[in-house]
Image (spheres, rainbow, N blue to C red):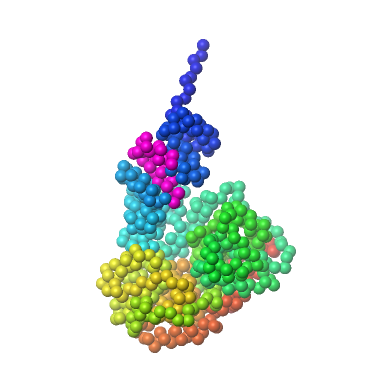
């Protein structure tokens, strides 16, 4: 006579369901959990497991509800508190997330995951200083945690909080080089844009892009959707079909540079499609851009797979990504290879780090001979500057004067309107020495973050300079911003990431720009712009020369005035602002790369000369 085994207990059933979730069988797990909760609505394990299922389906509000029920039975269970914090954060309730995670930290102060989530919930509420402290604590408990390090460095850069930033940056570089993250091999990858703000080493920039592509971009692309470069299939039609892909087809720095190019493209040779996956901000720029293409396609609501299918169904010959590794990027679309040729241009100053992108547009200054090793793409070196410009950008006829902006009527006004994340302690050291050598001068910087403004004033005072000599500019409409640039005397560029759109804005209104080129693309754009306006004398040879030039120019107002006159007089003939000349050059590049494709030849470096 065989003995019958007793039926599994509710706890055993809940454990079975958890095993099924972990083995990729969520539907079967859900049926078991439903039965458990029917028999015991407060079953702790079943509530947690069911919450996990809802989180997997992005139903974070329901997940949070179930976790709160579970915590009524055991309010001090740290894993449940962390799961609740994650669910609340994903439900856009960061204050509730912080409350849950703070309880977890109090119960388990050595838990790095708890401090990481606390940092994320604080950052989502704009509590940047507190968030940076949480991220730094995470990195202390879990050395090499790349997500914590990246988050701490990013916040510190944005808020100009440079205390203790250098060790964090060096730890992040070490993490990148080893490919490890505190034992998290294959985990979080260092964001390429962040690495460009940390280092001037183009080899590190390439490495960060390659790792990020491998570990982050491709993580969202199923193996079955990863396609190889298209086989050679000649297309017999008279015009090349271009597809520009961007999150920034709105009032944005990228659009302010490229809008006129879309309008000027030679329609006898090209069809021009725009694929917009960013917000419609209802701006005049958005309206202008929507009319600048032969077809303007809003793909904001599509999945990456649907987006790629739209490109393929439109039979785009050459897809041109304008976003790169900047906010809102959707590079997983390019990973699906929807177009025969795929390029990167303008939005991100460096390599994408993938063979899914065939070409990168550059010039002979930002990517000098020998720089090819730092790019996975083939380089298209355009004559003049790689940066396109829009001659139609408006400058306000009049506006507030120096007094209204808090500037001295007679003293020298140095300015740098780069984003505050481009500033650094080393750069400010130089600028303070320049100000000290030029009595009555001021430094005019831009930030829309009060914490950054307060930290900058504190940093200036710590260097022995009256913080009143630091003037903080606020955000104003584009035409008014261009007009106020005329009030400054000299634009000081930053390193390792220099002025791009902000540099050409200054030159457009006649404001001289002083730059010191670095080794990487991001730090050489200023030199490219100055070369294209015929002012190489404003390109310093090194940091010492940069500092000496800034002081010398400030002491020679007649020379500054002459530079301003030359810029204004030559603006209409300068290569940098000749949009139609740029259009002819880039169209020649498109023609060459497409001819190679039609002949069955692989992508190759293209070196165009004026």
Please report the residue visible at 50 percent of the width from the left and 52 percent of the height from the top.
216
Residue 575 image point, x, y percent:
55, 79
- Confirm whether the magenta stretch covers residue 72: yes
Q: Looking at the rendering, which quadrant does residue 518 occupy?
A: bottom left
Q: Is residue 432 left or right of residue 367?
A: left
Please report the residue visible at 57 percent of the width from the left and 68 percent of the height from the top.
287
Q: Nearer the viewer, residue 358 or 295?
A: 295
Q: Looking at the rendering, which quadrant does residue 164 occupy?
A: bottom left
Q: Is residue 447 left or right of residue 305?
A: left
Please report the residue visible at 53 percent of the width from the left and 68 percent of the height from the top.
283
Residue 536 in view, yes or no: no
Residue 318 image point, x, y percent:
63, 63
User: Magenta part mainly helix, strand or loop?
Assistant: helix
| Rendered view: 225 above or below 581 | above
- Confirm whether the magenta stretch covers residue 600: no
Q: Nearer the viewer, residue 47 or 380?
A: 47
| Rendered view: 576 above or below 286 | below
Q: Which residues are magenta?
A: 65-92
Residue 42 in view, yes or no: yes
Residue 211 image point, x, y percent:
49, 54
Q: Is residue 598 left or right of residue 402?
A: right
Q: Looking at the rendering, which quadrant does residue 381 occupy?
A: bottom right
Please report the residue visible at 53 percent of the width from the left and 72 percent of the height from the top.
257
Residue 373 image point, x, y percent:
51, 63
Q: Nearer the viewer, residue 215 or 338?
A: 338
């Amino acid at each position: 006579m065989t003995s019958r085994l007793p039926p599994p207990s509710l706890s055993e059933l809940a454990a079975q369901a958890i095993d099924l979730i972990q083995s990729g069988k969520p539907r079967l797990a859900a049926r078991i959990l439903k039965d458990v909760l029917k028999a015991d609505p407060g079953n702790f394990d079943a509530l947690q497991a069911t919450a996990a299922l809802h989180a997997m389906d992005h139903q974070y509000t329901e997940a949070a509800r179930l976790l709160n029920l579970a915590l009524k039975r055991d309010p001090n269970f740290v894993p449940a508190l962390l799961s609740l914090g994650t669910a609340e954060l994903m439900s856009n309730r960061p204050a509730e997330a912080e409350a849950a995670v703070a309880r977890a930290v109090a119960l388990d102060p050595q838990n790095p995951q708890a401090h990481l989530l606390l940092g994320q919930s604080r950052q989502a509420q704009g509590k940047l200083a507190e968030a940076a402290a949480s991220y730094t604590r995470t990195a202390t408990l879990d050395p090499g945690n790349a997500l914590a390090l990246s988050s701490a460095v990013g916040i510190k850069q944005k808020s100009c909080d440079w205390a203790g930033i250098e060790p964090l940056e060096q730890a992040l570089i070490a993490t990148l080089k080893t490919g490890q993250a505190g034992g998290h091999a294959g985990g979080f990858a260092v964001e390429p844009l962040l690495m460009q703000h940390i280092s001037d080493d183009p080899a590190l920039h390439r490495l960060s892009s390659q790792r990020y592509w491998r570990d982050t971009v491709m993580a969202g692309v199923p193996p079955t959707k990863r396609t190889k470069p298209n086989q050679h299939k000649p297309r017999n039609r008279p015009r090349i079909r271009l597809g520009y892909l961007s999150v920034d087809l709105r009032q944005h720095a990228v659009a302010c540079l490229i809008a006129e190019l879309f309008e000027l493209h030679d329609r006898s040779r090209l069809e021009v499609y725009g694929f917009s996956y960013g917000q419609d901000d209802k701006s005049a720029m958005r309206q202008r851009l929507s009319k600048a293409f032969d077809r303007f396609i809003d793909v904001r609501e599509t999945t990456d797979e649907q987006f790629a299918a739209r490109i393929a169904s439109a039979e785009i010959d050459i897809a041109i990504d304008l976003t790169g590794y900047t906010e809102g990027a959707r590079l997983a679309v390019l990973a699906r290879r929807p177009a025969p040729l795929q390029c990167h241009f303008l939005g991100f100053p460096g390599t994408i780090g993938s063979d899914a992108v065939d070409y990168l547009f550059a010039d002979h200054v930002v990517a000098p001979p020998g720089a090819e090793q730092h790019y996975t793409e083939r380089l298209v070196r355009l004559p003049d500057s790689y940066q396109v410009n829009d001659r139609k950008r408006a400058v306000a006829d009049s506006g507030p004067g120096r007094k209204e902006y808090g500037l001295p009527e007679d003293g020298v006004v140095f300015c740098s309107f780069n984003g505050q994340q481009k500033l650094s302690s080393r750069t400010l050291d130089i600028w303070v020495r320049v100000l000290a050598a030029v009595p009555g001068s001021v430094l005019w910087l831009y930030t829309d973050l009060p914490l950054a403004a307060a930290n900058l004033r504190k940093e200036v005072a710590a260097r022995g300079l009256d913080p009143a000599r630091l003037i903080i500019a606020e955000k104003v409409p584009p035409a008014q911003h261009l007009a106020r640039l005329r009030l400054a005397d000299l634009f000081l560029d930053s390193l390792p990431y220099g002025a791009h759109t902000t540099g050409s804005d200054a030159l457009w209104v006649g404001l001289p720009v002083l730059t010191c080129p670095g080794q990487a693309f991001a730090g050489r754009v200023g030199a490219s712009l100055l070369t294209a306006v015929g002012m190489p004398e404003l390109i310093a040879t090194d940091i010492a020369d940069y500092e000496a030039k800034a002081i010398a120019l400030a002491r020679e107002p007649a020379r500054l005035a002459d530079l301003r006159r030359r810029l204004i007089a030559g603006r209409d003939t300068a290569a940098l602002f000749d949009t139609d000349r740029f259009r002819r050059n880039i169209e020649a590049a498109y023609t060459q790369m497409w001819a190679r494709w039609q002949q069955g030849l692989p992508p190759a470096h293209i070196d165009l000369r004026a």
